[in-house]
Amino acid sequence: MIVMLKALLVSHRLGGFDGVSVAAEKWRTVLSHLGFDVVRVASHYVRREPGDVLVPGMWADLPGQPCPPLDAPAVRDLVRRADLVVLDNLGTLPSAPEAALGWQDILLREKVPTIVRHHDPGWQIVSGLWGPYHPSAGLPLHHPGMLHVTINRITEQEFADRFPGLRDRGALVTAYNTVDVRELVDGDRSGTRKALRVDDEDLLVLHPIALGKRKNIPAAVELARSLQRLYGASRRVRYWVTHTSAKWESVPPDIQEVFATAPGLLVGSVPDRGDMYAAADLVVLSSTWEGFGQPVPEAMVAGRPVAAGPYPVLRELVDLHGWRVLDPLRPEEVFHALEDTERLPELIAWNRARAERMDTAEFAPTMRTLVRAAEDLAEGRTGIRAVPNTDTSPGAGWPITWSRPLVDDPARHLPSP
């Protein structure tokens, strides 16, 4: 009889189009391919599936309210039946600190291999936006008995500076997000535009975000407005923001005012991400901060030009991949790029070829290394001991980096893809 290993994928909420939910689904796919029976665990689901487990305590019942107490007995029962646990941003955001610390305590007591993936540490969210950062006690989680995975090297360095003990144990690593190439290349452009009531000749500017100050919505709207001025009466520009909300009143008043000036405003999402990108003529991500900026490589794989920045992680990814990204703060340059019928296809092909190297299908060797390191740390051994493969050519797998090379065990190299 074959006994499958069980993995828990845990976050505040899952099943949405937010960056954490999208990235979590890719990890679920890869872990499943490695032979794990993956169970999603959250306190809120945008779209719930059979087999999902609802555990109270990680999501507030009402916006602005504290989270209810964590159901510790339920967590303990889940952990004791698990072979691996992934805390996806649960141990990072200060949204439910008591719950995160409760999970950590149970996981360490039960010695279950754990990967803590950090998308958005509190100091990145608050710094420069809502005043000084006041850390919750113990957050972000940083115990060296668990493997801590950041999604960019900026965050990795910040963790290394604040928690230097992670380096010594090989418990800190960067593994970039991936892109599901197959689901993005065959979107239904005409059908989606028809459902959105967007004419064939309209320029559809897609802004795929959830609302937040870091998303810099005014800059994206201003780009759309500027493009409309540059096109004049020759072409209608439509601004499409994918934020979904049951009530318009839930949108902050200042953002409502900005939306009121957006040309041809569309609000809401479509079920299929491939259809979403296929319908667009330009994708904009004008954020001041992103942990990764998933729409950028997704749009490139889907064959769409991208105007993005100025968030710092974009520069890290551009330097790594050689992407060619338009500047949303320079609308004239964006306009000329869109109208250059000779160079625009070259730009799209250049970016697509490089973004396709991030295919989730290439991530299994890296995931295998992460799981093995988490197992070692849970048993008190050194975690990451391999020299990273930084080859980003097609077929080389998705790169993984860590704070310093650990070569005390030469046999433990990153597996060949």
Image (tube, rainbow, N blue to C red):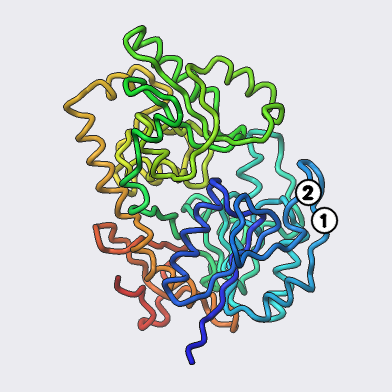
Q: Residues within 10 Å of mark 1 (few under 14, many from 20)?
A: some
The image shows residue 176, relative to residue 410, as above or below, that is above
SS for dot 2: loop
In terms of image quadrants, where is residue 127? top right
Seen at 43% across and 67% down, the residue is 30
Q: Is residue 132 left or right of residue 211?
A: right
Between the residue at mark 2 and the residue at mark 1, the CA separation in whole angstroms equals 8 Å
Q: Which disc number belongs to residue 61?
A: 2
Judging depth in this view, the residue of 385 and 264 nearest the camera is 264
Looking at the picture, how far across and down is residue 382, in whole percent? 52, 78
Q: Nearer the viewer, mark 2 or mark 1?
A: 2
Give yes or no for contact between labels 2 and 1 (Cβ–Cβ under 8 Å): yes
Q: Quadrant of the C terminus?
A: bottom left
Type of the residue with mark 2: Asp
Q: Mark 2 or mark 1: name the one nearer the start of the chain.
A: 2
Give the number of marks.
Answer: 2
**Farthest bottom residue in view:** 1
Looking at the picture, how far across and down is residue 401, in whole percent? 41, 62
In terms of image quadrants, where is residue 331? top left
Looking at the picture, how far across and down is residue 203, in whole percent? 36, 22
- Residue 164 seen from this side: no
Type of the residue with mark 1: Pro
**Farthest left residue in view:** 342
Q: Which disc number belongs to residue 68?
A: 1
